[in-house]
Amino acid sequence: MKNQIKKQTENHKKGFIVTLDAIIALILSLFFVSYTFSIANSFPSYESVSYVKMQRIGQDALNAMEMTNSFGSQSMINGIFQQTGDQICMKLEIYNQSFTPSARKDTFMKPGCNPKKDQEINSGDRSFRTFYQDGDFKYAVISVWLKETT
Amino acid sequence: MKMKNERKINKKKDKDIWMKGYILSVSALLLFSVVISFARNTETLKQQMKDSYHNAVQISKLKYFINDISEDLGNLILVDYITDNSSASTYNINIIDNISINKTKFLADYSPFLQGYGNITGTNISFSYSDPLIVNFNNGMQYSSKLEGTSVIFRNATGNSPITNYTITLVANTAYTNYTEFNWEASGTYITIYYSDTSPPHTFTKSGYINSSLLNQFTINYSSGNVTILAGLVDGAGNAIGVNQSLPTQLSSIIINSTMAEALPIAYNPSLNISILNANYAANVPA
């Protein structure tokens, strides 16, 4: 009887240690897995690289427009739009002196592009350029996105 | 005796199990440590890649902003240059001074506008300027233009200008009444003047040599006021060229063309300070 009680106590003790061991192992495994995932998520993603490329294309287009005095001329703007390739979509907005909806003067969309159909434009996709025209400083704001292929 | 032996065997068995457990735990911990150490190294490497990628993006953005501001100042004074046919290191330089733009108003409005530009692009931009607006060249040449448009001069800031041939083009808003020419010489610095005005249109072209160590003046008179082309010793600078005009100004643009060896425009005198996160630029606006 005494031996049985002692054996039972030892079994309980063993069970407790096994459970504790399993819990520690689980915590360590979870820590390891979450740590690995956190590292994987910290890499520059394809989207962010693509976003920078889109910005560069926008900046190049704005630079070309300012150097050729194209702001305000639909045909010259379209000429520069066409140089950017079929897969690239662009929308150019001209603002008078301040970047507010009421100051927006003109909007030029690259032919064949539709922002609602292709992609929702958010502020992060925009590139800005300042220029001087007709005695005032203005902003040219360009949004660039990839055309949706169906 | 039998029980004692059994207890001894059990005790040994327990000890073996504990030992095995200990070794397994230590192995597992070692394995985790090695994997975590690899993961940490990879993270550091990737973080370095990410940082250099972000820095490259910031520097590229900085370059873009500087270029944008330089292009804007080009509305006031644009320095254009191409390689001369005679030599790859000789440049044909065109300085186009747009007198019709009110430089004082332009620059006064530009500083707050740039601050607004900084706000919408997440950039700190500060811009400061002084009168006159100057473009410096890498060989010591300097083009200087008073903001109110009354005086421009193209000279060597530290000595005599090396230029032997100047072409100056003046475009005026009103018709001239008469002009008084330079004292043309048989040799010296060769000057060509192209003049045109608009209402009613007049044009004339004059050219010849002047003595570059003396002040020479070519005065064009209007019904009110005059424009004087200065060549030779101007404001203490030898072999320089400049234009003075009375107020209200008659000219809408002044273009000075010359050929110089190893001379390129470096910067306008307004100073610019731009910072985007870790990238910073604090110097004059490049021309």
Image: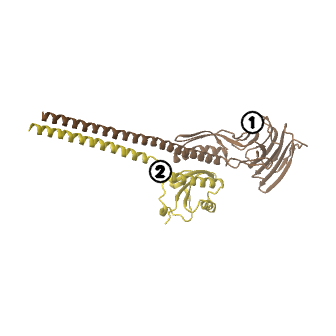
Chain colours: A yellow, B brown
Say which quadrant the N terminus of chain B sits in: top left
Between the C-alphas of marks 2 and 1, the distance is 52 Å
The amino acid on which the numbered mark 1 sits, given as a three-letter code, is Ala
Instruction: Specify the farthest residue to the front.
Output: B1
Q: Which x, y percent locates residue B92?
A: 77, 47
Q: Residue furthest right?
A: B186
Q: Residue B157: which disc?
A: 1
Q: Indicate the secondary structure of the residue bearing disc 1.
A: loop
For label 2, count other residues whose C-alpha is less than 10 Å away and answer few (under 14), some (14-19) or many (20+).
few
Q: Chain of mark 1?
A: B
As rendered, which of B286 and B237 lies closer to the eye? B286
Residue that appears at 62% across and 47% down: B67
Q: Nearer the viewer, mark 2 or mark 1?
A: 2
Task: Evaluate if marks 2 and 1 touch, with contact meaning CB atoms under 8 Å apart.
Answer: no
Q: Which is more toward the observer, B70 or B11? A: B11
Residue B113 visible to an observer of this rendering? no
* Chain of residue at mark 2: A
* Amino acid on which disc 2 is placed: Ser
- The answer to whether dots 2 and 1 both sit on one chain is no
User: In the figure, B215 relative to B173: above or below?
Assistant: above
Inspect this view and state whether residue A53 appears.
yes
Q: Which residue is mark 2?
A: A45
